Image (spheres, rainbow, N blue to C red):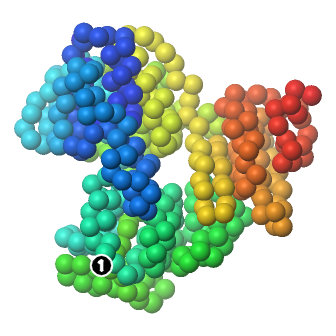
Amino acid sequence: MNYVIVGNGVAGISAAEAIRQLDPGGRLTMIAAETFPPYCRPMISLLLEGAVTPEKLPIRPPSFYEQLQIQPILGDSVVSLDVPNRMMHTRQGRTVAFDRLLIATGADPNPIPAMKPGMKNVFFMRTEVQVRQMLDVLPQVRQALVLGGGLVGFKAAYALLHRGLQATMLIRSDYPLAMQVDDQAGKMILKELVGHGLEVKVGVDVTGFDGVEKVTRAHLSDGTDLPCDLVIVSKGVSPALSFVSGDQIKVNQGIVVDEYLATTAAGIFAAGDVAEARDITRGTCRINAIWPEAVDQGRLAGMNMAGRRVAYRGSLGRNVIRIFDLDVMTGGLVHPPAEPAYEVHSALDLRRRTYRKLVFHQDRLVGIIMVNAIDQGGILLSLIRSRMPLAIPREQMLSPAFNYRTLLR
């Protein structure tokens, strides 16, 4: 069997390891644009912060490819996929044939209209290389600008604050992490960030930049200007699908996969940030671009590619974030539709700085937001994943004293 994996992120390497466990003798090739060894992408913000060195990023040893008898093609990328003839063409002119293929190319950051090509102090924060390039210019930085208040933007701003730099975050919504939290938790997060020196402008975007080789000033949609010598663009990501034709493989936002991570093209699978798989809380397919799901999807895709038929139970979006003195945990459906089948219960304690929100669909828990006192969050996430019918009074589940014994009683 001739296996090919496009992408050497955690979904790709998890698939490779699963294939090798089941098929030690099959031919296995991995194609990846990056040349750095497989690494922990969520940790690159810690590299920017200075909390870790580049040597701490790899999650597999340099001998990874040799140990698993993988033929690596690094520093190259796929530009076209010929499904009927079972082959791919790369940017460097290679033609790679396959019997079974995994697309695990991840996602690419979204550009903004105001970006000019060649600006040496405007960065995305998606790869280890991009963060190292930021570190090279940091000694000359006095005023940084972060565009976007999602997870990447938040982590970038947080890292810059730890570096002692002045930073301003521009977000279109009324509070950071608007996709992960509601307005109450968002306001608590906003207050925490501002209290630690981050300037946050809400409902504002960039309309243009001054500068030739480097940005010196940003023009904002509220009519003001802002001097800056570092810009980090974090306006979301899109699945890296430039070589995938919707005529050959079904694509919505991402590549649509079934319960076995298989695409609509025979012998071709997808996993990670590029895959649109069933979401447990919604019952529909969507992308949940988080590290644990990429691991699970990659492992199961690899097993199915090697002939062991194993179903994927579905994805569950969740995040745990430390924001100075706030611990925030979210999971599942935090912005439910305004329908009678959904109930929302919440409890806020301003003195203790705690907040808890539970979202139910009929008798099942489908979403949580917790700010501080998150010790029992793992139990709540397991209830969401298990889809267990719950007869317990909702007020008990809102209590910080809630635990698994409460369920047993």
Q: Considering only vertical position in the picture, is 48 above or below 31? A: below
Q: Quadrant of residue 179?
A: bottom right
**According to the image, label 1 marks what residue?**
140
The image position of residue 39, as x and y in percent, is 35, 42
Total numbered labels placed on residues in the image? 1
Q: Image check: 298 left or right of 73? A: right
Residue closer to the observer: 367 or 298? 298
Q: Quadrant of residue 273?
A: top left
Residue closer to the observer: 281 or 327? 327
Residue type marked 1: Gln
Q: Which residue is painted at 31% across and 65% down in the image?
A: 135
Q: Which residue is painted at 43% across and 62% down in the image?
A: 49
Q: Quadrant of residue 144?
A: bottom left
The image position of residue 328, as x and y in percent, is 66, 54
Residue 196 at least partly seen:
yes
The quadrant of the rendering that contains the C terminus is top right
Residue closer to the observer: 189 or 263? 189
The quadrant of the rendering that contains the N terminus is top left
Q: Residue furthest left?
A: 93
Q: Which residue is painted at 34% across and 78% down in the image?
A: 141
Residue 337 at least partly seen:
no
**How busy is the neighbourhood of tag 1: few (under 14 within 10 Å), some, or many (20 plus)?**
few
The image position of residue 225, as x and y in percent, is 41, 89
Q: Image check: 329 left or right of 239? A: right
Q: Residue furthest bottom?
A: 224
Q: Which residue is painted at 48% across and 29% down in the image?
A: 296
The image position of residue 270, as x and y in percent, is 37, 30
Q: Considering only vertical position in the picture, is 20 above or below 101? A: above
**Secondary structure found at label 1:** helix
Q: Considering only vertical position in the picture, is 305 above or below 219? A: above
